[in-house]
Amino acid sequence: MSSLLVRGGTVVTMNTNRDVLRADVLIRDDRIAEIGSVSETAGRIIDATGRIVIPGLVQSHVHLCQTLFRNRADDLPLLDWLKRRIWPLEAAHHEDSLRLSAQLGLLELIRGGTTTIQDVGTVHHTDVIFEEIERSGLRAVGGKVMMDHPEDVPAGLRESLRESLDESLRLYERWNGAAGGRIGYALTPRFAVSCTEALLREVGQLSTRHQIPVHSHACENREEVEAVRQRFQKDNIQVFIDSGAADFHLCLAHCVWVGEREMDLLSERGIHVLHCPSANLKLGSGIAPIPELLQRGVSVSLGADGAPCNNNLDAFLEMRLAALIQKPRLGPAALPAEQAFEMATLGGARALRMGEAIGSIEVGKKADLAIVDVQQAHTLPGSASSIYGRLVYSARSADVTDTIVDGRVLMADRQILTLDEQECYRQLSPSLDALLKRAELP
């Protein structure tokens, strides 16, 4: 049995009582074994004195396949961003460029204390993304993008309904429960605009029959909302409900343009909203009505979305923005720091059906932790009463020193141990040049 002792930190537990403790955390194998004053020795000790120990952050909506496109699709609205930049680039991916894109994203996530993600793949080569997730040590739910609509989809991404379903099921059988249960699978229709009604119905049936969660996008942009209404003669959320995709476990990213009835439907059907504030701002999509959703009991979590629409994969930035952007709308107390932090931990755990295993630091739960160095000019001074504000409003992803998943140290004293960071950087320029040439983009 392996053991790890995180000694002397300020532990933000996120347990039911929201205890904040000056304590040691003892880890045995992949579980938290003890929290308090630990006298026994351990195989490895991390000194967290003067630092904050937090539950590993959960990002419920990211696109690892897009990390290589960072800074290549700026200042465009959603549908132009997709059609003029992202879809041609995704269609041009080969296995090697997709692998590098996933590696680069995983490096950034580990550096920033994110321990669990829900990833949106692309249409082809999805095994490569799962392989890199497995190698990195991160916890993840992922899925192959499904796109079968005959219009407006590049030839390199277009697939038939049967091809989409068959490949999704193959990936589910191969990867769901892989890496000792660290990896899960979700059916991932991209969004209603790129899917036929028949595909969405099949997704709903597969989800219900095999108990596979569904992960998609909805109500991100006004133009997208109108396109869905024109095609389906109903609102976006109703499309997913009528297809059966909400019958088991549905996660929808964005939900910016939802009216009263759609917010009620999200609540009534237990649909999880994946809030991506940076991406919604950068694409000019708008500000999601998160406080209104939370008041209705909707489960809300956070994600950075993709590197080309953010342009970071920084959970600290998403927490900060999630709290700040509501204040001009509804007042300074509209979304407090503690609530933003909960969205990045327990909220993400709930969205990924992992609430019993991750999202808080409690005995018996998975040992997914991050350690934050708050002895910095931009985080000092601090006080026990402002711990959440210090994490959400002051701290940055670069303040994370150690990242632990399943009791395994992925980053120690800012050194990543599971991926070859320098080799990844060395390959970036030649891989990107070849990708841009294949996509015929400047």
Image (cartoon, rainbow, N blue to C red):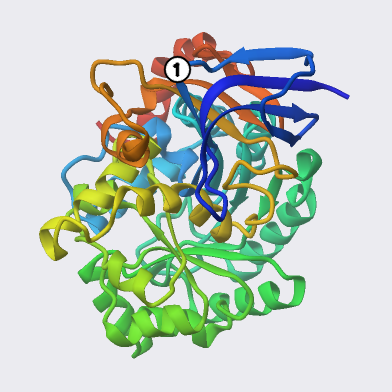
Q: Work out whether residue 67 or residue 231 is closer to the camera in this orientation and state it.
A: 67
The quadrant in which the C terminus is found is top left
The answer to whether residue 393 is above or below residue 248 is above
Residue 196 appears in the picture as rendered: yes
Give how far across and how far down residue 381 sits, in percent: 26, 23
Label 1: state its secondary structure. loop
Q: Work out whether residue 25 or residue 1 is closer to the camera in this orientation and state it.
A: 25
Q: Which residue is mark 1?
A: 50
Which residue shows up at 37% across the image and 21% down it? 374
Give how far across and how far down residue 361 sits, in percent: 61, 41
The quadrant holding residue 294 is bottom left
Q: Work out whether residue 84 or residue 303 is closer to the camera in this orientation and state it.
A: 303
Q: Amino acid at mark 1?
A: Gly
Residue 309 appears in the picture as rendered: no
For the image, the number of numbered tags is 1
The quadrant in which the N terminus is found is top right
- Is 271 placed left or right of 6 in the picture? left
Q: Work out whether residue 159 or residue 266 is closer to the camera in this orientation and state it.
A: 266
Q: Residues within 10 Å of mark 1 (few under 14, many from 20)?
A: some
Residue sitting farthest toward the bottom:
233
Which residue shows up at 33% across the image and 28% down it? 396
Which residue shows up at 35% across the image and 74% down it? 295
Residue sitting farthest toward the right:
1
Give how far across and how far down residue 441 sits, in percent: 28, 35
Which residue shows up at 25% across the image and 40% down it? 73
Give how far across and how far down residue 126 sits, in percent: 61, 44
